[in-house]
Structures are given as C-alpha cells and as structure tokens.
Amino acid sequence: MRQREELIILRKRVSLLVYVIVSALLVLAFGFWDHQMVYSSYYADRAEENRVREVPLIAARGRIFDRFNRIIADNRPSYNIVLVRENSPHTVEQTLGMLAPGLEITVAELQERVERRKRQPLFRPIILKEDVSVADMAFVRSHKYDLPEISVEEQPRRRYLGGEMAAHALGYVGEVNDTELATKEFEDFKAGDQVGKSGLERQYNKVLRGIDGFKRVIVNSFGREMGQLEAEEPIAGQDLHTTLDIDLQRAAEEAIGEHSGAVVALDPRTGEVLAFISKPAFDPNLFATRISGADWNNLNKDPRKPLQNRVIQSHFSPGSVFKVFMAAAGLEAETLNPLQSTYCPGHATFYGHTFACMKASGHGIIGLHNAIVNSCNVFFYNVGKELGIERISHYATMMGLGRKTGIDLPSENAGLIPSVEWKQKAMKAAWYAGETISVAIGQGYVSVTPMQTAWAMGGLASGGRLKQPHLVTPEELRKSGFRVGEVFSEQYPIHASTVDIVSKAMWGVVNEKGGTATRARVEGFDVAGKTGTAQVVGKAARLKGDQYEDNAWFVGYAPYRNPEIVVAAFIENGGHGGVVAAPVAHELLDTYYRKKTGTFGTESTPNVAQSGRTVPGPAGR
Amino acid sequence: MVNSLRTQRFWKDFDWLLLGAAVVLSVISLAEIYSSTISSGSENYFMRQFAWVMVGLVSLFIVSSIDYHILSEHIPWIYLGAVSLLVYTLIFGKTVAGSKSWISFGGFSFQPSELIKIVVVIALARFFSELHIERYMTLSQILKAGLVCGVPVLLVMRQGDLGTAITFIPALAFGLFVRGIRPAVLISLFLCFLLVLPVSWLFLKDYQKDRITTFVDPELDPQGRGYQIIQSKIAIGSGGFWGKGLFKGTQNQLGFLPTRHTDFIFSVVGEELGFLGVMTTLGLLSFILLRSVHNAQTARDNLGMFIVMGIVGIYFFHIVENVGMVIGFMPVTGIPLPFLSYGGSSVLAAFIALGLVISVRRCRYVN
C-alpha cells in the first residue's frame, strides 16, 4: 500500500518532466521553423554565395597604332598568383609563410600586399605576385591541394613594342591608387584595375579600357572549382590610332643619341603630332608589371630625370629662336622698319649695362634679314627696346608662346612670357627696362616648352593659323563612338608681308652661306628655321662642366612656303643650336622628305599611308 | 511448451513501435551518412554504419530479452568493471581529436564512455529504487547518488572529453528529481551551479572558451570559430520546407558543413530533407522519448521506472544539445545525435538503451 502511494508520487514527478521535455522540443521545432520557413530565402542566398564564386575575366586594353597602322602597344597574356581568403583552411600568415619561399618573395612583402587590400570582401582575389614565371606557376600548381586558397589568374598585360620609343607620349599603365580613385577622372574604376597613369594611356583611358567580364563558378569549401555556371566574356578596349609616325620617331631618337632633350614634329596644317621624343626616356614595359622598388627608385632618383616629359612639361629659355617672334612682333607693331639697319660692334649698352652679341667682333652694319640669318643680338636688343615688354608680351602670347597648346596629353606646362603685371604679381617687383633687353633675345624670364616653340613656329609660318596639337584626331575618336568637336584652331592677325620677311630670313638661316643652321638643310626640301643657344647660367659657372653647357635649339619647318611639317629640336646642355640641334631636326626632316618622295628604306610601308588606316591592324592583341 | 509460451509472450509484448521509430531513424541516418561522405570516398562510412546498426539491432533484441532485474543484481560488479575500463582508457587509451577516450581492440576503435553511461543509469536506478523514504531524499543520499555518477564523470573529464562527461549528468538530475529532493535543495543546487559557472570558466581550455564565446556571437569570427555554426545555419535555412533533395545539398556536397556525418548530421537532414524531414526526424526522436516516459510510468516497479527515466534524461540531453547546436541555440560540443550521427559506440549505446526500455515495458505484466 505504502509502495503504491510512493509510486503515484513518483509518477506525478515523471509527468512534470514530460512538460520539460515537450517544451524543449517545441523550442527546437520553433527554431527550425524560424530558419527554414521564415528566413529560408536569406539562408538560401548565403548558401548560393558560398557555392558560387565570381572570377573576374580581365579585359585587354585597346592597342595603340601609329599613323600607318603599325602597332606601338599591344597586350600579351600574363599570369598572377592570387589569394582568396574566403574559406581558406589557413590563416593568412600560414598561407604566406608557406608561399613565400616558393615564390622567392619575403613574407613581409606579401603581407604588405595583403594589408593594402585587407578591407575588400574576402572572396575577392588579392594579387600576391604579378606576371609570374613558369617556375612560380609550377610551384603553385604542385601545391594546389595544400594551398587551395592560392590560384593563378590570367591578366592581359601591356606590351610596348618599341621599348622606350615615344614613352612620354604613350605614358604607362599601372594599378589605380587610392588617391586617383577619389578623383572624378577615375570614378568608373575600382581598386585593382589597371589604368593609364600618364600620357596617351591616361588621356584616352576611356577609349582604351575594356569591359571586364566574369565567370561564375561552383566552388567547394576549399575554393576548388567544381564547375562553371555562366560566363560573360571580357570586351577588349578600343584601339587608338595616333598621328605618330614611327619612322620619324626613330630617326629623331637615333639622331639625338645619348643627349638629354626633346624633339617634336607637327603638321602645322592640322596640328597632328608626327613625332614626340623626350630623352632620356624610360621603358613603359617596366610599369606594365608592377614596377619593382629598385626600378622605380632608379627612374625617380636619376639626375637626368627620365620621367620628365621634356616636350610639354619642361620649359626653357628659347634663346635666339625668340628673335623670329621679336621680328614678327616689331613688324606688326610697326616699331621695326623692314629696311632698318643697325650697327653691331659686338656689344651694346642699354640703361648703363653692356649686353654682348653672339659674335664678339660684331656684325657691323646689319639689316633684319641678316640679323636673323646670323643671329645678331645687338639688332634685336634694339627691336626689343623699341617694342617694350608689354608689346613683346602681347605679341608673343598671341603667337602661341607662354600658354598651353592644348595638346591631348595630361600635365602640359604653360611656360612663361613675362609682363609687367606678371612680375608685379609673381615677384612683387617693378619691371626694369633693362630686363626687356634680355627678353628680346629669348633670355631672362622667357621660358617655353619645345611643344610651344614648334606650335608657334608652325603658326607663324602658316600665316598666323594655330591648330591645336593632337596625337589622336577627332575623326578617330568619332570612329570609336566618342562625341568630340573639331580641334580648336585660331587665326591671329598678321600681315602676309611680315610672314614673308621672317620666312625668307629663316630660309636663309638654313640655306644661305653663313646661316647658323646649314646643317638642317635637306636637298630639294626648302627647310627654314632658327637656331637658339640659350645660356643656362652665367659664363663663370659654365666653365665648370658639362651640365652648364648652353641649351641648344633648332626650330624649323619645311617647305618654307605652306609648310607641312614643323620640328622643334632641343638639346639640353648641348652647346650651339646650329651644331647640335639642327642635325637632329635634319634627320627627322630628311626622313620625312624621303618618305614623301618614295625614297625611304624598305622596312616601312609608305603605301599604306592613306588607305591603311581603315584596315584592321595586324593581329597580336 | 513453457519455453514456446514465453517466446510467444516476448514477441507479443515487444514494443514494435519503439523499434520501428529507431529503424526509420537509422534509415534516414544511413541515407544522410551516404550523402555526406559520397564525395570524400576514402572510407566507407555507409557500410561501417550499416554494420553497426545491424550489431545494434541484435544487441537490442538481446538486451530486451534479459530481465533488467538480473542486470540490476549484478550491477555493482558491472559498475566496478566499467570504472576500471575508464581508468584503463585513461592510461592506455588512444587520443582522437584531443580526447583520450578511445580504446582499440582487434581492428576497430571503441569509445567506452558511451556504453558506460548505461551502466551508470542502471547503477543509479538501483540506488534510487532501493531508497524507501517519505517524500524527499536526505543530503547524504543525494551525495551518495552524486558519487555513483560522479566517479565515471570525473574519469571521462580526465580523458579530456568534457562534452561526453556532461551527458552523464541528466541521468542523475532526472533520477534526483523523480526520487524527490526538497525544493530548497533544488534551488540551492541550482544556485551552486550558477556560482560554479564563472569559476569553471577559469578551468576551461581555450577551445572550450572559444565555443562559448562563439555561441554567444558566431559572427565574431566567421572564418574561424564561428564558421561551423554559421555554415550549419545556412545549410538548414537554405533547405526550406521541402529541402534540396537527398544528395543535392550544396552545403553538404561541397563541403561547407564541418563534421557533417557525425555531430552536424542534423544540418544535412535540414538542408537535404527540409523542414519536412526535420519535423519527421525530430518527431520520431520525440516519440521515442515520450513513449519511453510512458513506459517508465507503466513500469512494474521503481527500478524499471528509474532505468527508463535515466535513459530518457541522457538522450533528451543529447537531442536538445545536438539539435539545438546545429541552429545555434546551444554551444558547440562533440555530442552525437542518437541513431543519426555516424559512430559505432554511439549507435550501439542507443540501441542497447532502447533495448532496456523495451525490456522494462515487456516486464510490466510479468508477475
């Protein structure tokens, strides 16, 4: 009986436990309801994210051609080793530790690369090493089971077929950096993208860039590809047809040799840039793969400044080249009579200072024509004195000096044509009349880029018509689907007689006996031009060494009536313009003339010249 | 004649429904073990598990045919043997995944702690059933019961298998509750437990602490410690109502689920068989628990009732912990889900336990 009672009590307690059990099971059932019914689509999405990985297929950039459809830059296949942190069986430190010896990179360097991309989504690949060797790829392939988080990614890479050729015009490509990404120019890009960093590559990024594709692949938890779902092929960027002529480019590069300097050739009728040389140059191929620290230091610390674009960024005293513009200004302002003569004793005194002439013994009695041909300073001191700084400034600027030419390249420098107002603003000082005398022969504050001198010279020789210089014509851009207007063109007022007088004188510089640039002469092609020899520092310092040698100029064009080509050759610390710069221009003009007359060597294809531009270029993207 | 009558009686009183539930669960288990190991290939988990189920079924019939009173009679010796086996394991055992809780003989390894749980259950049941008291146990009785359970628990803990050690406790708790403890004692035990919690934190190993912090917030370290639980939740949630279909769970087949044929087998069920499959499986497990409770209430004597309630306590905890773990309701421990998780010791223990429950039921009419 007692036992029976006891049993009843105990069974009641068991019943209480039933409530505990049932309620716990109901909580669990609710949990599954919550996961599988209420939030099912959320988890389904996450399962899909797990299983599917998007692999970028990187588009090739458009190729770059010269005006005769010859490839200057194309792309080659290359492979990167990448890390995908998502679902990695190792910590990043472990992975890098295992990888570093095989890739012959220090762990620290790898870590730095990961660090920079740390905040990007885990599934996005981080490039650990670019453009890897066959040995590197073999290492990764042989470890694909121990290191499933490491894979090889294909990326087309820029290849500049000419090496350093036209490097400053082409520019280079590289990975877009954070500062750039913050600007409007690069707003369409994302971290890790290859973009044009300078030159044409940057200017025409929008044309050249392709549209990256992607493929969606099924991966397992180790990141190994198990199958493909869909793919969108990348679309290569559009080709860029430039106005450059490789033959002219090469001729000038050879002629300039080891000198530092710049050569630029334009067609003054259209503004097309035919050649664009800045020396010393760099090899843009170095940037196509992430440039190594050592290479970058070499380029940056090189005292000869190979990264400097001497055609449009550097500006120098034009020296005697400026005399041509002084002559035109004097004639236009009617402060200079074309029949006027001056006596040159080899020096002249203005405002208590004595200014020397090029020829210490003096030119004797000299007229305008010979003053240009023989480059007489004394004559032009007087021209400058009569004009005064304000008129010099006005006419020089009008003729295209001291302002940007508007060439289709980034970072053009304006140079400087001084004025009273400028000096007041920049130096908080009044203009001294004596300074005008230096300006008259292209010294003092006057500073121009080689591009400007070619542009202004072409404009003057073409009767005051300035065509915006460009490396890519608006027609080409329209073919690529861009809406662009015509190149800008301006016509400044100048008398035909003025043009005639200075042109004849410049023809004399090249072709007359005693002219300063007879070395620029091309038989059969009426070359005209003007030399310049600009002092870098005072004569005392000049004795010290090479780097204080004069800067040599020759700016010329041909034929001297209705010119087709204008060339500015500038040799830094080269010495005398007629001796150093004129021969460089000669080589370029001679090549141009031989191509024009069909006597140019066999390696080029002059016949392609007109029809070839619409024909698709040779393969080799 | 007598013999055949007893045999007839055995089959007639046999709890076919409990057996049926266990068999259906085993079928689901085998299907999902096959599904979750199909891609790894190296070891034939399916065949091994199938063999263990067969061994389990035979053991179930053997155990259910034995009168549990006979087991109870010999339990002191069995208990001593079990404790010796644990000591042996502690000294000569094999370390698997950080726990020295395996012994191997012949070709295969075995985790004795799984089976020793049942020994502890019977020992406790005998202790509780032999107490004749008014209403509540005395403190010394409680301590004695704690000792019976505590010795093997401490030994298992020494093996480094805290999870398994904890699974012994519910047998004691259920027994104490049913035998009767004063509400004041119940409350003070609970308070002691709360007090011990922060202190025990100091004695936990790093991975054990990680499991707790991960349980609180798995997204703290989604690639590391939180990974298992996040992937499990994704698998289950993405299964939806109908499931992705057997062999078609991407989380399972592509290897995103960790330990998917053992501790996380229920995630695979959730992903491939959906809410429907989960409810079926959970329903069958609940059925086994509740029918066992019913068997306890209709048991002929206290001994039978305490045996069944001890077993219910252990497996109730297994189910709540394992199933709760896969949806993040409970912290991660290596506790298998009875009848479903891969593992010979676990399957064998579950069938033997069920055999005991059936034996208790069978004996209720025997006089």
Image (cartoon, rainbow, N blue to C red):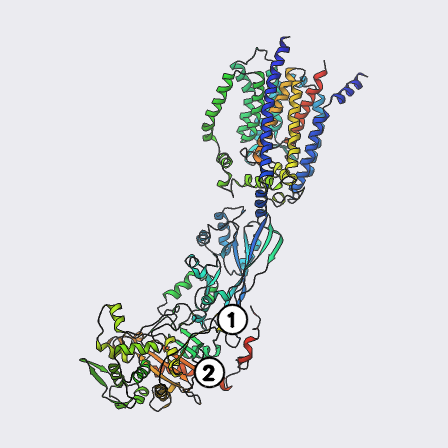
The quadrant of the image that shows the N terminus of chain A is top right
Q: Which residue is mark 2?
A: A592
Residue type for callout 2: Tyr
Residue contact between numbered discs 1 and 2, judged by CB atoms under 8 Å: no
* On screen, residue B270 above or below A207: above
Decide: few, some or many residues near mark 2? Use Cα within 10 Å; few <14, some 14-19, many ≥20: many
What mark, if any, has residue A252 been given in the picture?
none
Residue A11 in view of the camera:
yes
* Callouts 1 and 2 in the same chain: yes
- Which residue is outermost to the left? A352
Name the residue: 28% across, 80% down: A441
Residue found at the far front of this picture: A493
Q: Position of residue A154 (x, y in %)?
A: 55, 59
| Residue A288 point in image, percent of width and height | 48, 64
| Cα separation between marks 1 and 2 | 28 Å
* x 52%, y 56%: residue: A81
Reading the chain from its start, which is encountered first: label 1 or label 2? 1
Q: Which residue is mark 1?
A: A478
Name, please, the residue furthest toward the top.
Answer: A1
Relative depth, front residue between A289 and B66: A289
Location of residue B61 (image quadrant): top right
Number of labels in the image equals 2
Question: Is A507 displayed left or right of B218 in the figure?
Answer: left
Return the residue nearer the eye: B89 or B137: B137
**Of A236 and B124, the residue lying toward us:** A236
Left or right: B286 with respect to A244? right
Q: Is residue A549 visible?
A: no
Q: Secondary structure at mark 1?
A: helix
Label 1 crowd (10 A; few <14 / some 14-19 / many >=20): few
